[in-house]
Image (cartoon, rainbow, N blue to C red):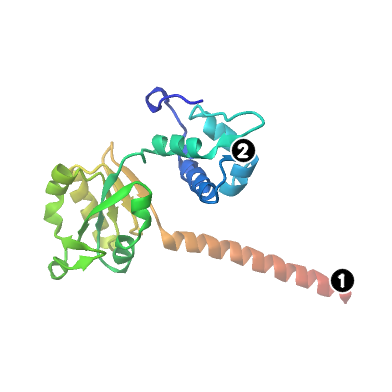
Amino acid sequence: MSAEPSARRGIPDATVARLPEYLRALTGLAERGITSVSSEELATAAGVRSAKLRKDLSHLGSYGVRGVGYEVDHLAYQISRELGLTQDWPVAIIGMGNLGHALAAYSGFATRGFRVVALLDQDASLHGQEIAGIAVQPMDTLDSLVSDEGLAIGVIATPAASAQGVCDQLVAAGVRSILNFAPCVLVVPEGVDVRKVDLSTELQILAFHEQRKALAAQGALDVAAVVSG
């Protein structure tokens, strides 16, 4: 049914970006007691075209069974393994403002293969304060977190002005994967992966589409008024 991960190479970035959506859809199906699913049904649940889904899954070596579709649990395991979610990844969240607090309290990390091992902040007045059962630590503990806890991923939830400095500290400590919530572009050396989550940009894109819909609706009203007049 599928090849071992070590035997697979060259999965396109666009496919990798869609794998979490497929996993989310499969998890939802499993929770509803569904054991097998067609490519059309899975594609609908994930919000993509079925042809694109089949092509994406072919990169994993999984083609399903003609007339039956995909076994939900098996495919979910395949995708989890490809994404590296069959082991826990130690995560540190840096910046204990409102966003950092919310991320620290997010229960979804633990259920998706991520273990928050540290909360960090430059503000000494926050050190020792517990958030979601974890004490806030100073930034100079980064080196020990990498060596002792195997810290793999840093989540930056600081203001933009301090994000690059925090990023530099993470990289210097040996962290090679960073999730950035700060509204800025981070400069990192080769070999360091950065994913950016910019809430304001997403809202601006939604505002653009709302404006287009409003203008289209107004245009239709204007045409109707001319015709009726």
Q: Is residue 20 above or below residue 129?
A: above
Residue 169 makes an appearance in the image: yes
Label 1: how many Cα within 10 Å (few below 14, some 14–19, many 20+): few
On residue 190, the disc is none
Hey, which residue is sitting farthest right in the picture?
A: 228
Label 2: how many Cα within 10 Å (few below 14, some 14–19, many 20+): many
What's under tag 1, amino acid-wise?
A: Val
Q: In the image, 177: left or right of 58?
A: left
Query: Can you give x and y, in whole percent of width and height, for residue 225 in the image?
Result: 82, 75
Query: Can you give x and y, in whole percent of width and height, for residue 71 in the image?
Result: 55, 36
Q: Nearer the viewer, mark 2 or mark 1?
A: 2
What's under tag 2, amino acid-wise?
A: Ser
Disc 2 element:
helix
Query: In the rendered image, which residue does mark 1 sit on?
Result: 227
Query: In the rendered image, which residue does mark 2 sit on?
Result: 39
In terms of image quadrants, where is residue 118?
Answer: bottom left
Disc 1 element:
helix
Closer to the N terminus: mark 2 or mark 1?
Answer: 2
Of residues 13 and 79, the one drawn nearer to the viewer in this rendering: 79
Q: Residue at x 28, y 36 (%)?
A: 191
In terms of image quadrants, where is residue 214?
Answer: bottom right
Q: In the image, 213: left or right of 220?
A: left
